[in-house]
Amino acid sequence: MPLTFKTHEERMAHPLGKLIPEEYWHVSFKRVLSDEQIELMNLCAGELQNCISALRSKTLSDEDKIAVFYAIANSHPKLDYSDFKNILTEIHFPNSDYLSHFCTLANIDYLNAYAKDSQSEFLSSFQQNKNTLYTQSARAGHLEVLEYLESIAPDQVQNMISEFEYFVYSEVARNGHVSVMRHIES
């Protein structure tokens, strides 16, 4: 039976509900954990492939693909990059979206593996989206991702920071990401 939550607090108290990033809860998950998503989240890593094979026969919307992405990534944090990439390939998750979602996950291992595995695609996506990636990572308090992005293009750090607008600083502060504020100011 699908899970719905009446409040943010109720969702955050649930072991599966709290695994979904807030920015995707309302759009990709439509405020519901479906039976399929619950099944994916409860499977051991070795059983995922069979369930994904069943999903392959369905036509998934872009939002459904994102929901599958986060359901698997957040409930299987030790899943090997190559296994995860195979799953993403099977559900036709767009390669062009990997970088953005790996930054949202704050998974440096996935970022490194993606950069190594698909260097030109990684760099192209980075160049097109670096300011957005930097801003989203700051809002989420992912200091390690900010540092990672800065290491890719140390000569562009000031440009990425200058793209911040006042509201981004206020969100970072409101969310209590003091270490991110200090980092950006230094």
Image (cartoon, grey):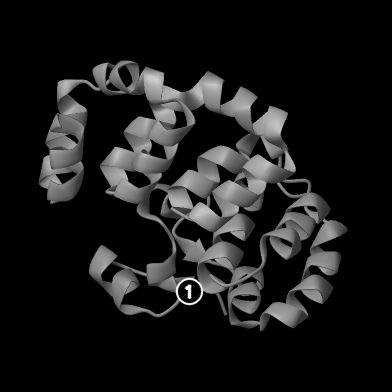
Residue displayed at 30% across by 47% down = 143
Q: Is residue 167 above or below residue 105?
A: above
Q: Is 182 rendered above or below residue 57?
A: above
**Residue 66 x, y percent position in the rendering:** 59, 50
Residue picked out by circle 1: 3
Work out whether residue 98 or residue 13 is closer to the camera in this orientation and state it: 98
Image position of 160 (left or right of 29):
left
Quadrant for residue 109, please give it: bottom right
**Looking at the figure, which quarter contains the C terminus?**
top left
- Residue 62 horizontal/vertical position (percent): 66, 42
| Of the pair 107 and 176, the residue shown nearer to us | 107
* Location of residue 82 by image quarter: bottom right
Tell me what residue is drawn at x 43 percent, y 35 percent: 151
Residue 142 shows in the view: no
Q: Residue 73: where, in percent of width, then height?
A: 57, 63
Could you tell me which secondary element the residue under label 1 belongs to?
Answer: strand
Left or right? Give the position of 49 relative to 144. right
Who is closer to the viewer here, 150 or 34? Answer: 150
In the image, residue 180 sits, relative to residue 11, either above or below, namely: above
Disc tally is: 1
Is residue 181 something that shows in the picture?
Answer: yes
Observer-nearest of 2 and 164: 164
Residue 185 pos. (x, y %): 14, 31
Image quadrant where one finds the N terminus: bottom right
